[in-house]
Image (cartoon, rainbow, N blue to C red):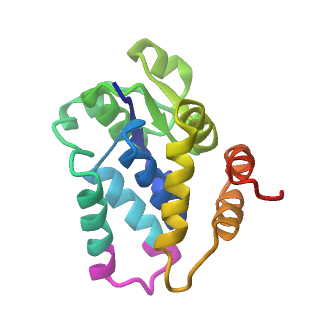
Amino acid sequence: MAFVVVYDACVLFPAPLRDLLIRVARTGVVQAHWSDQIIEECFRALLRERPDLAPENLARTKALMNRALPDANVSGHEPLIDSFVLPDPNDRHVLAAAVRIGAQAIVTFNLDDFPATALEPLGLESKHPDDFLIEALDIAPGAIAAAVHEQAAALKNPSKSIVEVLENLQKQGLPLAVARLREAFGSPR
């Protein structure tokens, strides 16, 4: 049985991290989920940062995400939203989605927004993506390394080496996972 998680909008925001997290889920090591609300939150943030992005490009990204993980989208969680208390009420939809599908963790950079006091009674925890990827590497190092290799191989415009992909992931706040992946690839630090 795969580890069940919900990816928060903040970890889906940077394209390289989103790509890796989806590829990790496709290995079967984890069962990843999101909701339309999470995707909409992510895309609103993308448009604030990149107003030049065309809506059709975002629609294509969403379609590709849903094609890559056809069972990822959570629905039916909306009635649960108002029953939760979190530091930021705007994050309750993420928690509701996690509860709805019986997730074990919410993968997020915003750990303070999902405190243990709110999550533990629900059998949930929040995980920084670096810690999440370390755990995935502990479970299936070859599968996760293969996901990174596939990610690098898929980049065509411009193409990137595994070393460049790892450097990019490190810049996005994944120093521990990148160090482990460098060891797996035999790459210099």
Looking at the image, the residue that sits furthest to the right is 189
Q: Residue at x 49, y 40 (%)?
A: 107
Residue closest to the far left:
76
Q: Position of residue 136 (x, y in %)?
A: 54, 36
Point out the image quarter for the C terminus.
Answer: bottom right
Task: In this rendered view, identify the residue nearer to me: 66 or 163.
Answer: 163
Judging depth in this view, the residue of 109 and 68 nearest the camera is 68
Please name the residue shown 69% across and 54% down the image.
185
| Residue 46, magenta (yes or no) | no
Stretch of the chain drawn in magenta: 47-58
Q: Quadrant of the N terminus?
A: top left
Q: Is residue 13 visible?
A: no
* Placement of 170 over or under 64, stated as above or below: above
Q: Can residue 81 be seen?
A: yes
Residue 157: percent from left, percent from top: 50, 86
Q: Nearer the viewer, residue 142 or 115?
A: 142
Q: Position of residue 45 (x, y in %)?
A: 46, 65
